[in-house]
Image: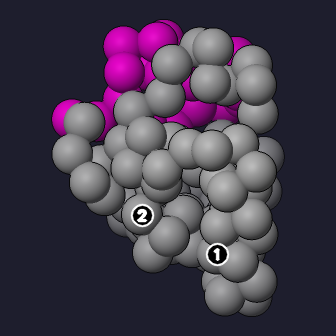
Amino acid sequence: MASLIRGSFAVALRKLGLPAWETVMIGDTPCDVEAGLEAGTAAAGILTGGFAQEALRGAGCYAVSEDLHGLLPDLQRGGPAATPGAATASTSQLKRA
C-alpha cells in the first residue's frame, strides 16, 4: 500500500511542479505518514483514521490535530525546518493542491 501512495505523491508533485522537500503530506494513518516521508515530504496527521496521536507522531508526523483546520497554525508557521526530507508548505501551496 505504501508504494501505491508513494507513487501517487510522485505524480501529484510532478503535476504541481513542486519538489517533495517543499511539501507536507497530510494523512490519517501511519501508512500515509510513512509513504510521505519515504517520498521525501514532511508529514502531518489528522485523527480521522482511527489511529491515536501517538501512533501518528511515532510514524513521523511533526504535527497532529483533530482535523485539517487544527493543522493550519502549524502549516502557516512553515512546518519543520526547510531541509530535504523535512519540508514546509505555504498557504498558497496548500490552496493549489
- Provide residue 88's location: percent of width, then percent of height: 39, 33
Q: Is residue 63 one of those drawn in magenta?
A: yes
Quadrant of the rendered structure where residue 71 is? top right
Q: Which mark is residue 40?
A: 2
- Provide residue 6's location: percent of width, then percent of height: 64, 75
Query: Marks 2 and 1, Cα distance to the nearest angstrom?
Result: 9 Å
Q: Name the element at disc 1.
A: helix
- Quarter of the image containing the N terminus? bottom right
Q: Earlier in the sequence, mark 2 or mark 1?
A: 1
Q: Check disc 2 and give the amino acid type.
A: Gly
Q: Residue at position x 25%, y 36% from top?
A: 82
Judge whether 96 appears above or below 51 on screen.
Answer: above
Q: Is residue 46 visible?
A: yes
Q: Residue at position x 56%, y 44% from top?
A: 18
On screen, residue 48 versus residue 72, left or right, reads: right
On screen, residue 41 versus residue 27, left or right, reads: left
**In the depicted view, which residue is nearer to us: 58 or 35?**
35
Quadrant of the rendered structure where residue 80 is? top left
Q: Which mark is residue 85?
A: none
Judge whether 53 appears above or below 37 on screen.
Answer: above
Judge whether 14 appears above or below 90 on screen.
Answer: below
- Provide residue 67's location: percent of width, then percent of height: 72, 29
Given contact means CB atoms under 8 Å apart, are the residues at marks 2 and 1 in contact?
A: no
Q: Which residue is mark 1?
A: 6
Q: Name the element at disc 2.
A: loop
- Quarter of the image containing the C terminus? top right
On screen, residue 81 versus residue 88, left or right, reads: left
Give the extent of the magenta segment. Answer: 61-81
**In the depicted view, which residue is nearer to us: 96 or 37?**
96
